[in-house]
Image (cartoon, rainbow, N blue to C red):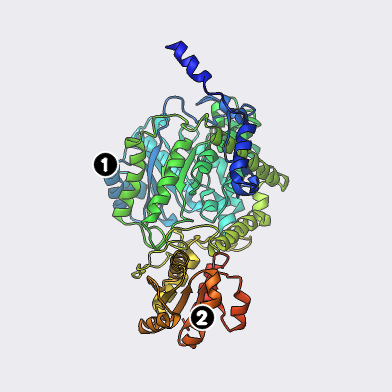
Amino acid sequence: MSNNKERLFNEFLAPTTQEWLDKIQVDLKGADFNKKLVWRTNEGFNVQPFYRREDVLKLKTPDALPGEFPFVRGNKKDNNNWYVRQEIFAADAKEANAKALDILNKGIDSLGFHIPGDKVSKEFIETLLDNILCDIVEVNFSTCKRHTLELAQILVEYFEKKGYDKAKVVGSIDFDPIEKIVMKGKNVEALIQVAPQLVDAFKDYPQFRCIAVNTVALNNAGAYIAQELGYALAWGNEYLQQMTDAGVDVDLAANKIKFNMGVSENYFMELAKFRAARLLWAQIVKQYEPKDDNSCQMVVNAITSKYNQTLFDSYVNLLRSQTEAMSAALGGIHSMVVTPFDAPYEIPSDFSERIARNQQLLLKEECHFGQIVDAGAGSYYIEHLTNSLAEEGWKLFLKVEEEGGFLEAAKKGTVQDVINATNAKRHEDAAKRKEFLLGTNQFPNFTEKSDGKEALDKKCCCHHKDDECGEFKKIESSRLAADFEELRIHTEKAKTPVAFMLTIGNLAMRQARAQFSCNFLACAGYKVIDNLGFKTVEEGVDAALEAKADIVVLCSSDDEYAEYAIPAFKYLDGRAMFVVAGAPACMDDLKAAGIENFVHVRCNVLQTLKEYNEKLGI
């Protein structure tokens, strides 16, 4: 048998990289390889159309082992299990407790309680945690930063009262004053001094973390993956430096930091991000000379993004979050929160929360993602992405350190400026459909109505007012779909225009352009009427007027527009808005005849639709 195998493989010689490139160049028929096949990422590096073993031989990441420094392949050696976490707003302790006990019977093993600052008390915590076994279930808490130390002391007293084995209590408190500076512009720098006291309170609880790095906020504000990565490192290093400068042992300080990171829709890139993040964080902590390499582990709670969620066609959010959850799970995270699909427009319902739980359970129990350690290891593509993201993230980390550290950069507003600029660019790209949002700016549901749904305003659960509010710049966060949703809801409330496709001439071109125009105009909630075709433009215009069309879209081929466009425009005679689908060579002649409106792939869709609304008096 072995001889047969040898003869078989001798029949097939392995082509070299150059031979592959030569073959590709032939197939491209003279087209530029770099323009056609090389992807320039938003993260600042190129991705090739194929990778080979020789591309990763020079990398160090494939040589790493699971559970060992620098932890690029994960913190565990024998499994990839993670905590399935659900968030609970705990304004009423009894109601929150009842909900927690209920979902603990439905697959959840990690709870995230959000407690208003004015509710923090011993009685509240005892009621909230009644019958919840904190040495079996992961318990996480967040409250007003000014009440966090008080909450910590109450929790420690509660754990001791219950007699829990301190080594078995797993959880965290979300203490992250820098997030308030970055996201709200509030000067809460003085609160950072509380960090050493928090660490001291939980020093005997090795698996309970109390300092948070909330770069999920940057993710939800539109940050690119490399930006979230680089800032996460600088953010975490800021806290580590502050605590060690205050005399906290480096091993203790490092073991109390938890990263809450977002997950966007870029499947392989996000998977690689978590690998790169662990690699770089381990290198950073190592510079502080900890006694134990395990102190260099990065513990991450992953939260699927809200930035790309949509109000319209909201069930598509399930597809987005499922892809994101897969990235996080395979990336080797500690715990995960899947954001419910209805989060953009309502407080998540029981149904949406159940689906969000089941999305994780499906991956863990049916797809067995929790059993394979670092499933992406050895993949030439993923190893390349890991290395490239690490390089870009490290560049940003060093840049922030040159500015004096993350806190100084946040106070100067440079972090906010970068994220705001990225957010603005992504909104512009969405407006031009360079970045797709299925169901919103591309392939919208033509017949869907908002049914009273509106975007939720962001409200803080803590009603404390800071005198220092607004001292620093803040990040202006808005979902990518927000502009289109606002336009569509406005159109729906005012008037729903009727757009009629006047299809004529070349069959293939008229159908393609009618479909393009229907998708284009439906992004604003217009009612679109497609047609099989007309023999004359007069027949088409008459049919449009009979359908009470507000817009008539001429759909044909570029060559035929010279014949059809001007007669159709003149026959319509201002009785409806006239639009030509495409950017034909004769466009200047058509404009000279008075035709103003054209829809094509180079249009800014959002701006064009706003202009149409204005012309229609909406």
State left or right for residue 341 relative to residue 228: left
Q: Could you tell me residue 511's position as x and y percent? A: 43, 66
State left or right for residue 487 relative to residue 447: right
Of all residues, the one furthest to the right in this rendering is: 402
State left or right for residue 520 relative to residue 562: left
Whichever of callouts 2 and 1 sits on the residue coming sooner in the sequence is 1
Which residue has dot 2 on it? 614
Q: Amino acid type of disc 1?
A: Asn
Q: Which mark is residue 105?
A: 1
In this rendering, the answer to whether 69 lies above or below 94 is above
537 or 177: nearer the viewer: 537
Helix or strand or loop: what does disc 2 sit on?
A: helix
Marks 2 and 1 sit apart, C-alpha to C-alpha, by 54 Å
Q: Are marks 2 and 1 in contact (CB under 8 Å)?
A: no
In this rendering, the answer to whether 2 lies above or below 404 is above
Q: Is residue 158 visible?
A: no
Q: Amino acid type of disc 2?
A: Glu
Q: Is residue 440 visible?
A: yes
Q: Place residue 80 in its image quadrant.
A: top left
- Label 1: few (<14), some (14–19) or many (≥20) C-alpha neighbours in 10 Å: few
Q: Place residue 549 in its image quadrant.
A: bottom left
Residue at (36% x, 84% y) in the render: 546
95 or 336: nearer the viewer: 336
Q: Could you tell me residue 560's position as x and y percent? A: 52, 73
Residue at (60% x, 48% y) in the render: 36
Helix or strand or loop: what does disc 1 sit on?
A: loop
